[in-house]
Image (cartoon, coloured by chain):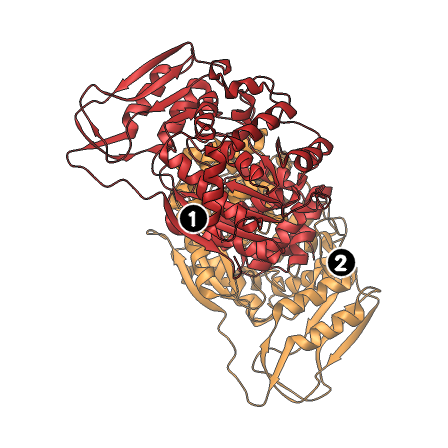
Chain colours: A red, B orange
Amino acid sequence: MRAYDLIKHKRDGGALTSEQVRALVAGYVDGSVADYQMAAFAMAVFFRGMSGDEVVGLTQAMLHSGIVVDLADVPGVKVDKHSTGGVGDKISLPLAPAVAACGVPVPMVSGRGLGHTGGTLDKLESIPGFKVDLPLTDYRRLVRDLGCCLIGQTKEIAPADKKLYALRDVTATVDCIPLIASSIMSKKLAEGIDALVLDVKVGSGAFMKKRDDAATLARTMVELGAGMGKQVVARLTSMEQPLGALVGNALEVLESIEVLSGGGPKDVVELTVELGAEMLVLGKVARDVADGRARISKSLQDGSAKERFGRIIEAQGGDRRVLDDVRRLPTAPRTLPVPAPRAGYVTAVDTEAVGIASMLLGGGRQRASDAVDPRVGLAVHRRIGDRVEAGEPLVTLHVADAGVDAAAARARDAFVIGDGPVPAPALFLERIAGGTA
Amino acid sequence: MRAYDLIKHKRDGGALTSEQVRALVAGYVDGSVADYQMAAFAMAVFFRGMSGDEVVGLTQAMLHSGIVVDLADVPGVKVDKHSTGGVGDKISLPLAPAVAACGVPVPMVSGRGLGHTGGTLDKLESIPGFKVDLPLTDYRRLVRDLGCCLIGQTKEIAPADKKLYALRDVTATVDCIPLIASSIMSKKLAEGIDALVLDVKVGSGAFMKKRDDAATLARTMVELGAGMGKQVVARLTSMEQPLGALVGNALEVLESIEVLSGGGPKDVVELTVELGAEMLVLGKVARDVADGRARISKSLQDGSAKERFGRIIEAQGGDRRVLDDVRRLPTAPRTLPVPAPRAGYVTAVDTEAVGIASMLLGGGRQRASDAVDPRVGLAVHRRIGDRVEAGEPLVTLHVADAGVDAAAARARDAFVIGDGPVPAPALFLERIAGGTA
């Protein structure tokens, strides 16, 4: 079947076989299917969606376009976590070492920040010397020896996904659930995992603003995992306000070190514990989620998670002394409070705007090719439901030279202040798992 | 606004301004908008449609991407006819000289056949010596001197349409009414016309199988014409069976000569008279359609249309003696009757299959780059409602060496034979015109 016929069939509401989808992607990679044909296909998928078989075919095609890391010689069930991205979401940093310290290997390939969201790689790189571009041989060795390695997507991993993602990015076909699900899963499965915990964000700071869309994405990925023989558990969690108190690269490392030292903001700790507990259950180290929670909490309290993070930092070329002396992290030259324009209660936060404020200061990227400034970001002083007096700071900007006025305006306007108190939104919204998880 | 934003806006159901559409097409022509972006946009248009303003913007952008012929020095109202294409549709051949003979200049830029449909240029080229690739200077001179010139789309005419059409052809975005309408109208308006009669075909041999779709296309083009200051009248006519008795390039010239000699099949004559009458009214030569019919009929009966065709053939390098000696037309080496498999009444014809039979014999093109054999085609002996006995020929194939068995099977299977008589379908279905026509 020609690419034309496959595009037309999808356009007219038909379902392709998973073989047909695989052939299309293979043709796209080898150049026999033109990028304009793939762009038309992606737009047709935007309107028509994809069947379960189609998503599996697409994921398999992208997965097998590159190297699938073989971690068979690493003992235990390898489990990773993926978040769909938000503002202040630094959970991977305390989570990965905590889970590894509890005995479950965590092979973690992360991404960079784009738009209003930060990226784990950018945060890690604000630790002096930390290298995220290790070759896959080192990655395999560290997962085996330390139970964890934190790297970026290499050229060998899912190159078809890389090519298709770049095309979607310029043809307005990014926000399409089957394409998002297959993109995430092809990369995650290429890491060599046995199971995966998904943190699907919902709310004003998430890509999915609506809970229904987030649930659909979560279900798509859980089913996709099942279709490919991997257990996947998804948690829908709130992104109606920034996660934790700090947003920005070095600032989020700082907050992660607080959590690894047994402190840190309540929501960051709770989410780390909850997602870690799911990973320990999938990794067959915890009996159930309650047991998992206890084990993760203990690893944060007794220093074992922090100790493990120190070994990971060292193994990846970083300065592990930051864990005990956070002044070794890069710091913004000055700070600037953003005062509340009136007294009242915070009733809502435009969390995406908070993320954009950090980006405008240089902490994020407008385009994938932009550089980030690890020093800048903001500290959030009020959460939904909190009382604030006129003139009290809502946030404090950590600034260098870029974007100060624009960021201050964005941050101030992001907070909706009303007359009466409102309840704080729940962090945990829904758990979606397959038949056996 | 970036191309990305325009694609996304259209994808999400928004309407662009006609300036935005023009900017998009201009960017596509100059290369700043990539072909994959235009493909995604076209697919979004397939699903979302276009507003009147958008179609006008698109048409203007494509029209002004090349030369718009200026026929201001040709006296009179210049009127052309365009058909959306069918099987056996040779109407342009008797029509253009008849209308010119009645005093209305006909500047006609035609296309080639593709798939199951024939093209006027291919038919004209079966007249020995006839040249359709005249430069625009000759075209202008012949329209002025003879009232008619029959050429193909030159490189200078609507190059953006040419580029976009080629892209649509490989991305399954051809059958989309606003894109069809703007493609047709940008080419027609570039000819230098003042008014246009559209023959929108409906039925088993047409691109539009459904009357509603055909009516929508017709209305879109009538409104588009009005939006660009041109009077457009559309006629919806039946393509439930081949037009006339002959299908194929030289065969259709032969049938056209019959009509120009005062004879020919009833449906071909009626359609020529009707469309010609509309053109004479738009051209302000006839008082009304009835007057127009009388004038066109007279030109076919008194030889003036045939005489005009002779002068056009001569001016375009062809052998005008074919008009009086059709043996000078290319002829297939042999013929092959296709017998009816049973007795009964023809109740339906898969007209597209009849067109494909002709194509398989070499009379049409599967791809735009294919050559055509002017000699081959078929004669249709039975029409819907006709009685046929078992073994009597339904059609006679005019064959050379290619595709005889496949064409015979297609032609035989195209005729549905039932037990009782059915009424012949009406040729004229609907007339769609703007406020003043």
Looking at the rendered image, the quarter that the N terminus of chain B falls into is top left
At which x and y percent is residue A166?
Answer: 59, 36
Q: Are marks 1 and 2 on the same chain?
A: no
Q: Which disc number belongs to residue A214? A: 1
At which x and y percent is residue B13?
Answer: 40, 46
Q: Is residue A387 among what the camera can see?
A: yes
Residue placed under numbered mark 2 in the picture:
B374
Under circle 1, the secondary element is helix
At which x and y percent is residue B242?
Answer: 61, 69
Q: Chain of mark 2?
A: B
Q: Chain of mark 1?
A: A
Q: Residues within 10 Å of mark 2 (few under 14, many from 20)?
A: many
User: Looking at the image, which is closer to me, B271 or B243?
Assistant: B243
Q: Are marks 1 and 2 in contact (CB under 8 Å)?
A: no
User: Looking at the image, which is closer to me, B342 or A299?
Assistant: A299
Q: Is residue A171 above or below residue B372?
A: above
